[in-house]
Image (tube, grey):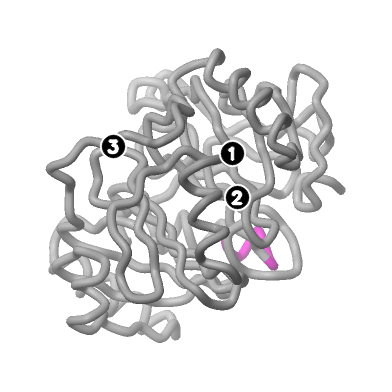
Amino acid sequence: MIKLHDIRYCRVGVSNLEDATRFATDILGLDIARRDGGAVYFKSDDRDHTLVYFEGDPRDHVVAFEAGSPEEIEQAAAQLERAGMPVRYGSDAERDARRVRAMIAFREPSGTQIELVFRPGHSGRRYHGRRDAGITGFSHVGLCTTDSRRDEQFWTRMCSAQVSDWIGEAPLLRIDEVHHKIALFPTTRSGIQHINHQVEGIDDLMRSWYFLRERGVRIVFGPGRHPTSGARFLYFEGPDGLVYEYSTGVRSITAADVEAGYRPRQFPFDPTGFCMWGSKPDIPEFRS
Ligand SMILES: [Fe+2]
């Protein structure tokens, strides 16, 4: 069992690094941690960085999770190899760039690159975005899946994720008490489907709704409220069409909740399964 302690960062290829960087700082509200070669590292909380844009193929996406020890990384590598999934250990240059002590990379069954890292860097400098979007931190990703049952099994049987709820065939998976840190959306490609940052409250969401609309950013869903996690949300389009989400008020599912009988619930794969306020998604993976 590969224990996923937390989600750590995303690395995303962008076709125009300067335009994408402007989006990240001036629209999304992130803070530049550093520029390194052909990449820009962004902070959204106390961690060294939580998002990286690199000049490259916009379909090239990486999601990293934190492991508890170097032994856990070695055990994960052995388990993945046994399952026929090739594993690569990170080079010195890769570990330096990511500010991690140990690292492996592999592809999950739909093909997205996953990195498992040990001792990722924390920051001695607090996050302070140029735009006050109310961000409290990077929280979860939607991942594309070409076979949601197969991939749900990968994340829940080979890794430590648990299903919190389903929307149609899309499982929302938790790796700690937060309702979901990974959500798998059926489609025909691999990669990240959306990137979520938590914001402090509903006022931040609504301020961003007006702010983004004034600047011509395409809103693709919301403002709304997920009946699954209870989070209020706003989804919008970023560089190269990748979807970004702000949300607030996601529910926790604690060990006590599970002991008290919490079971994953099945929601319909229609707008009511995604939003209890009546907003309709303009996101291909959220529509049947
Ligand atoms: Fe989300």
Q: Is residue 147 found inside the magenta-colored segment of the image?
A: yes
The residue singled out by tag 2 in the image is: 194
- The three-letter amino acid code for the residue at tag 2 is His
When the figure is inspected, residue 224 is found, relative to residue 103, above or below; the finding is: above
Separation of residues labelled 1 and 3 (CA atoms): 19 Å
In the foreground, 197 or 278: 197
* Secondary structure of residue under mark 3: loop
Residue visible at 25% across and 45% down in the picture: 47
User: CB of mark 1 within 8 Å of CB of mark 2?
Assistant: yes
Residue visible at 45% across and 70% down in the picture: 54
User: CB of mark 2 within 8 Å of CB of mark 3?
Assistant: no
The residue mark sitting in front, 2 or 3, is 3
Residue 83, image quadrant: bottom left
On residue 273, the disc is none
| Image quarter hosting the N terminus | bottom left
Sequence-earlier tag: 2 or 3: 3
When the figure is inspected, residue 238 is found, relative to residue 125, above or below; the finding is: below
The residue singled out by tag 1 in the image is: 245
Q: How many numbered discs sit on the rendered protein? A: 3
* Secondary structure of residue under mark 2: strand
Residue visible at 25% across and 64% down in the picture: 117
On residue 127, the disc is 3
Q: Is mark 1 within 8 Å of ligand 1?
A: yes
Provide residue 201's location: percent of width, then percent of height. 49, 16
The magenta span reads 146-151
Label 2 crowding class (10 Å Cα cut-off): few <14, some 14-19, many 20+? many
What secondary structure do most residues of the magenta stretch adopt?
helix
Sequence-earlier tag: 1 or 2: 2
